[in-house]
Image (cartoon, rainbow, N blue to C red):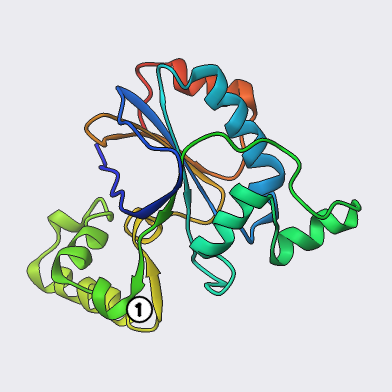
C-alpha cells in the first residue's frame, strides 16, 4: 500500500492530530475551484466528522509561487482576502472576499528550492511510484533516475508533499490511516455523499 509523504512548514491555523482515519485537502489559494467548492464542503465535513476523523487542509504551490504563499493563505484564513484568479472569479459575482467559514486546521506545504529537494532518497521515492520499478534492471532504474533528476533540475521551487505524492493538481484529496497508508485519493471534486461513503468505509483501498 502506498505511503503518504506529508511534510508541512508551519500551521496557518489549528493543529492536526493523526487519527485512525484522516483526510487531507490539498489546495492553492490561486485556485478558484478549491475555494469556491472545496472550502465549504471540507468545512462542512470537518464539523460533521472531525471528532472521529482527522482533517487537514494543506496549502501548496505547483505554479504561481508568488501568489500561492503562506502569507496569502494566512490572509485568506484571517481576513478572508482573495488573490489572483480566485479574486477575479469572486469579483464576477460582486464579492470581494470569501464569505464562508474556515474552521479546519490548515498548514503550509514544505516549499523548498529544487537543489535542496533533489536527493538520492527523494529521487528513489519518486521512481518507486512506478509499480514496475522494483522489477527493472539496474540499468533501467538508472535511466529513470536520470530522467527524474533532469526534470527536477528544471524547477526553481518544489512543494514537498505535492511532488512526492505526484498529485495531478488542485484540489486533491487523500484519505489515509494512522500509519500514513493511503486508502484512497482523487483529483478534482466529488459530492459530499461520495466523500462520506469513502470516509465511513473502513475497507477503503486506493
- Decide if residue 28 is in sight here: no
Q: Quadrant of the C terminus?
A: top left
Q: Viewed as shown, does residue 66 lie left or right of 163?
A: right
Q: What residue do we see at 65% from left, 29% from top?
A: 191
Tell me if residue 194 can be seen.
yes
Nearest the viewer among 47 and 45 is: 47
Question: Does residue 36 appear to the left or right of 75 in the view shown?
Answer: right
Q: Where is residue 16 drawn, in percent x and y?
A: 36, 36
Q: Quadrant of residue 167?
A: bottom left
Residue at 31% x, 25% y is 19
Left or right: where 65 falls relative to 98 = left
157 relative to 125, above or below: below
> Which residue, as the protein is rendered here, is positioned at the far front?
79
Q: Is residue 105 above or below residue 110?
A: above
Q: Position of residue 22 (x, y in %)?
A: 38, 29
**Residue at numbered disc 1:** 151
Number of residues whose C-alpha sits closer than 10 Å to that of mark 1, classed few (under 14), some (14–19) or many (20 or more): few
Give the answer, above or below, for where 75 lies relative to 174. below
Who's the residue at 35% across and 18% down the image? 203
User: Residue at the spot x=47%, y=22% of the render?
Assistant: 50
Amino acid at each position: 500500500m502506498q505511503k503518504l509523504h506529508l511534510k508541512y512548514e508551519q500551521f496557518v491555523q489549528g493543529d492536526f492530530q493523526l487519527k485512525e482515519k484522516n483526510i487531507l485537502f490539498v489546495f492553492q489559494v490561486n485556485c478558484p475551484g478549491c475555494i469556491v467548492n472545496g472550502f465549504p464542503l471540507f468545512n462542512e465535513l470537518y464539523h460533521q466528522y472531525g471528532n472521529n476523523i482527522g482533517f487537514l487542509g494543506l496549502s501548496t504551490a505547483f505554479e504561481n509561487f508568488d501568489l500561492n504563499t503562506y502569507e496569502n493563505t494566512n490572509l485568506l484564513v484571517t481576513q478572508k482576502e482573495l488573490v489572483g484568479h480566485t479574486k477575479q472569479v469572486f469579483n464576477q459575482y460582486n464579492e470581494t472576499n470569501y464569505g464562508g467559514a474556515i474552521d479546519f486546521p490548515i498548514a503550509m506545504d514544505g516549499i523548498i528550492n529544487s537543489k535542496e529537494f533533489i536527493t538520492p532518497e527523494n529521487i528513489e521515492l519518486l521512481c518507486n511510484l512506478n509499480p514496475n520499478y522494483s522489477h527493472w534492471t539496474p540499468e533501467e532504474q538508472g535511466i529513470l533516475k536520470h530522467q527524474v533528476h533532469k526534470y527536477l533540475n528544471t524547477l526553481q521551487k518544489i512543494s514537498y508533499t505535492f511532488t512526492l505524492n505526484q498529485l495531478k493538481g488542485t484540489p486533491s484529496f487523500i484519505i489515509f490511516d494512522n500509519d500514513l497508508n493511503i486508502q484512497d485519493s482523487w483529483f478534482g471534486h466529488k459530492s459530499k455523499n461520495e466523500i462520506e461513503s469513502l470516509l465511513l468505509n473502513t475497507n477503503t483501498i486506493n
